[in-house]
Image (tube, rainbow, N blue to C red):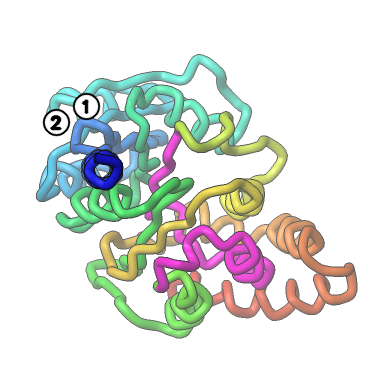
């Protein structure tokens, strides 16, 4: 009788564990994800971005958020049948705009889509698949290409370096290793910001801090990297980051402020003299973000 009771108890435990794992694998569905498109002024690339979101193999939620409300953005929202939210707080910088975008998404997963960039059709589907594989994901992010003029650039020196830096995170076991991700971030920021999906329920909000202009994403990764959970890297090119003269990234590289912020970020990981050396070489690498790179 005792033997039968133990067997029954073991079977119950197995069934419970199987049920738990099945729920874990399916805890995120299409309705749990939102693309929050940050629109600014009258970008000629906004519609291409919106169209790429409409072509996703898995259709999730899509919204537009802006701090520069205008007829052009409203017309784009109307054309694609998307809700449009205007940030009442103006002049606080990119961090405030991105935090507002996250706040307007009512789902646990949110991707801040930059208006100049495009997302390949399998992006959302892959995000959901990988989110359901992770035990406690903090952020999920993908490999990316560059969009230069009419060309999709899949490979160049900067992309090679960033892929090499992220290569340890190809191993699922290392997703939740704080030491690994902090060592990666100590050498720069290889994570492409518009490729990132945030798991709001596992993060402390607001995600971005005011005060940084060029490295506010790197600062966010550093802060999040201290938390318990996973940095989930999807080793597939699933979006394209546009490089053009008017882009915020290009403008910030030309600004000396970028150097100061890079140095401050390196100082979070290294003594000052090492941080200075790393900043020097990091600036050279970022030059490939220029159009002629």
Give the residues in magenta: 171-200
- Residue 241's quadrant in the figure? bottom left
Give the total number of marks visible in the rendering: 2
Label 1 crowd (10 A; few <14 / some 14-19 / many >=20): some
Q: Position of residue 14 (x, y in %)?
A: 26, 47
**5 in relation to 257, above or below:** above
Q: Is residue 288 visible?
A: no
Instruction: Find numbered disc 2 in the image and state the secondary structure of the residue it sits on.
Output: loop
Secondary structure under badge 1? Answer: helix
Identify the image quadrant of residue 238.
bottom left
Could you tell me residue 264's position as x and y percent? 79, 57
Q: Residue placed farthest to the top in the image? A: 88
What's the mark number on residue 196?
Answer: none
Q: Which residue is mark 1?
A: 77
- Label 2 neighbour load within 10 Å: few <14, some 14-19, many 20+: some
Disc 2 marks which residue? 80
Asked whether, in this view, residue 232 is left or right of residue 235, the answer is: right
Could you tell me if the residues under marks 2 and 1 are in contact, i.e. CB atoms within 8 Å? yes
The answer to if 195 sits in the magenta stretch is yes
Is residue 165 a member of the stretch shown in magenta?
A: no
Q: Nearer the viewer, residue 117 or 12?
A: 12
Q: Is residue 270 above or below residue 49?
A: below
The spot of residue 103 in percent (x, y) is: 45, 24
Q: Nearer the viewer, residue 178 or 54?
A: 178
Residue 277 appears anywhere in the view: yes
């Amino acid at each position: 009788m005792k033997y039968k009771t133990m067997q029954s108890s073991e079977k119950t435990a197995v069934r419970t564990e199987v049920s738990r794992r099945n729920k874990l694998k399916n805890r995120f569905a299409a309705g749990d994800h939102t693309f929050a498109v940050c629109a600014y002024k009258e970008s000629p690339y906004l519609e291409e971005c919106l169209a790429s979101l409409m072509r996703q193999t898995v259709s999730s939620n899509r919204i537009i958020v802006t701090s520069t409300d205008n007829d052009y953005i409203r017309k784009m929202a109307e054309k694609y049948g998307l809700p449009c939210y205007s940030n009442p707080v103006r002049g606080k910088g990119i961090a405030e705009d991105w935090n507002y975008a996250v706040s307007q998404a009512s789902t646990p997963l949110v991707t801040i889509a930059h208006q100049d960039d495009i997302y390949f059709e399998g992006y959302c589907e892959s995000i959901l698949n990988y989110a359901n594989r992770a035990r406690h994901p903090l952020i999920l992010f993908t490999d990316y290409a560059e969009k230069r003029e009419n060309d999709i650039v899949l490979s160049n020196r900067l992309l090679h370096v960033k892929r090499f830096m992220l290569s340890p995170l190809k191993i699922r076991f290392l997703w939740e290793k704080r030491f690994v991700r902090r060592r990666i971030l100590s050498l720069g920021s290889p994570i492409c910001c518009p490729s990132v999906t945030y798991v709001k329920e596992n993060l402390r909000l607001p995600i971005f801090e005011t005060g940084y202009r060029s490295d506010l994403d790197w600062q966010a990764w550093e802060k999040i990297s201290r938390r318990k959970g996973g940095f989930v890297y999807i080793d597939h090119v699933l979006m394209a980051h546009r490089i053009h003269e008017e882009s915020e990234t290009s403008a910030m590289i030309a600004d000396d402020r970028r150097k100061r912020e890079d140095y401050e970020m390196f100082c979070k990981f290294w003594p000052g003299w090492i941080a200075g050396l790393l900043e020097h070489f990091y600036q050279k690498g970022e030059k490939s973000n220029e159009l002629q790179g």
